[in-house]
Amino acid sequence: MVTEQLVRSFTRVALSPDPDLAVAALMIARVEYPKLDARPYIDLLDALGHEAARRVAAARPEVDDAPAHVDPEAYARVTALNDYLFKEQRFVGNDVQYEDPRNSFLNEVLDRRTGIPVTLALVYMEVARRAGVTVEGINLPGHFLVRCRTRPGCHHPGRPEELHDRDLIIDAHHGAFLSEDACRELLRRHAGEEAMWDVHLLGQATKQQILARMLLNLKRVYVRMYSYPQAKDATELLLAVDPSAINELRDRGLLAYHLNDFSGALRDLQTYLQLASKADLDEDDRKEQAQIWEQVKSLRRRVASLN
């Protein structure tokens, strides 16, 4: 079980304005590896970033290589970074064992050079930051992406009529650039044909959103494995990132119930019902609330019998 000290430290790092994601991600890994030493992995990211910086600095733009409306200089720099991480270092998505919890732990992703979209994107962002390339996460439903923004209004001397206003979107899971049409297709593939496209889906992900996405993936994997202690730990860290996430409060209560922590389950589920009663609920939510209310009544009787 995660310690109170780890939760406090994670909260401080996760909510800090510092863009560093690696330290918080390595704290998440302590759900599975309580004695993990983060320093070697920070050192490895530093080394990758140092070498990536050298490759990026040596990149020379070729006007004819860059896609239309993309700044050739930015394209050359990001291509050099992509070649280094995906071709030389061989970071790649783990499609064969996608549900392996190791895909959500930064130490394992760095050791094994494989993971899922959000953790590979995190490696990409951390190496890019160290290499002097400004990138940001995109919290697209179903598949996390990375973006390098071009310089607004930039013109190339050789083609002064061309405005370079198109961003570069990178899929770190497949090691490829994506067009907006490809992003639309990704959304349909993961969210269904009925999913409505909105350009805001390509908005910048905050530090808290990135860490929450990692933790949600991890929690779901552990629940499917019936690894309830680890799933509850992931939920504790999720609530540290977003204390207002009442569904996580509900899930922590349900996981406590599975772990025979009836007092903890009662406390969380009662609080959840109080907070949910103030929210606008659809019919399915009201049915779920009714089920949880029955569970709370049962828990009250059980806890009373233990006193």
Image (cartoon, rainbow, N blue to C red):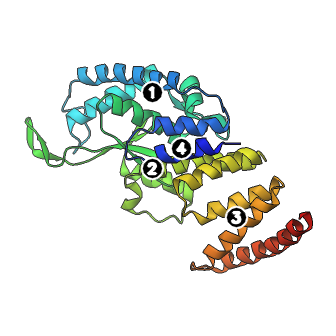
Position of 136 relative to 293 (above/below): above
Q: Is residue 135 left or right of residue 93?
A: left
Label ID, residue 86: 1
Q: Is residue 299 left or right of residue 229?
A: right
Label 4 SS: helix
Q: Earlier in the sequence, mark 4 or mark 2?
A: 4
Label ID, residue 56: none
Label 1 SS: helix
Residue at the disc numbered 4:
10
Q: Are marks 3 and 2 in contact (CB under 8 Å)?
A: no
Label 3 SS: helix
Mark 1 packing: few (<14 Cα in 10 Å), some, or many (20+)?
some
Q: Earlier in the sequence, mark 4 or mark 1?
A: 4
- Can the viewer see residue 42 in this picture? yes
Tell me the CA gap for discs 1 and 2.
Answer: 30 Å
Residue at the disc numbered 2:
15
Task: From the top left corner, tell me how far across and down residue 176 is, in percent.
Answer: 42, 36
Q: Which quarter of the figure has residue 150?
A: top left
Q: Nearer the viewer, residue 39 or 138?
A: 39
Mark 4 packing: few (<14 Cα in 10 Å), some, or many (20+)?
many
Task: From the top left corner, tell me how far across and down residue 171 is, in percent.
Answer: 44, 40
Position of 189 relative to 81 (above/below): below
Q: Nearer the viewer, residue 180 or 132?
A: 132
- Can the viewer see residue 174 in this picture? no
Residue drawn 36% across and 32% down? 128
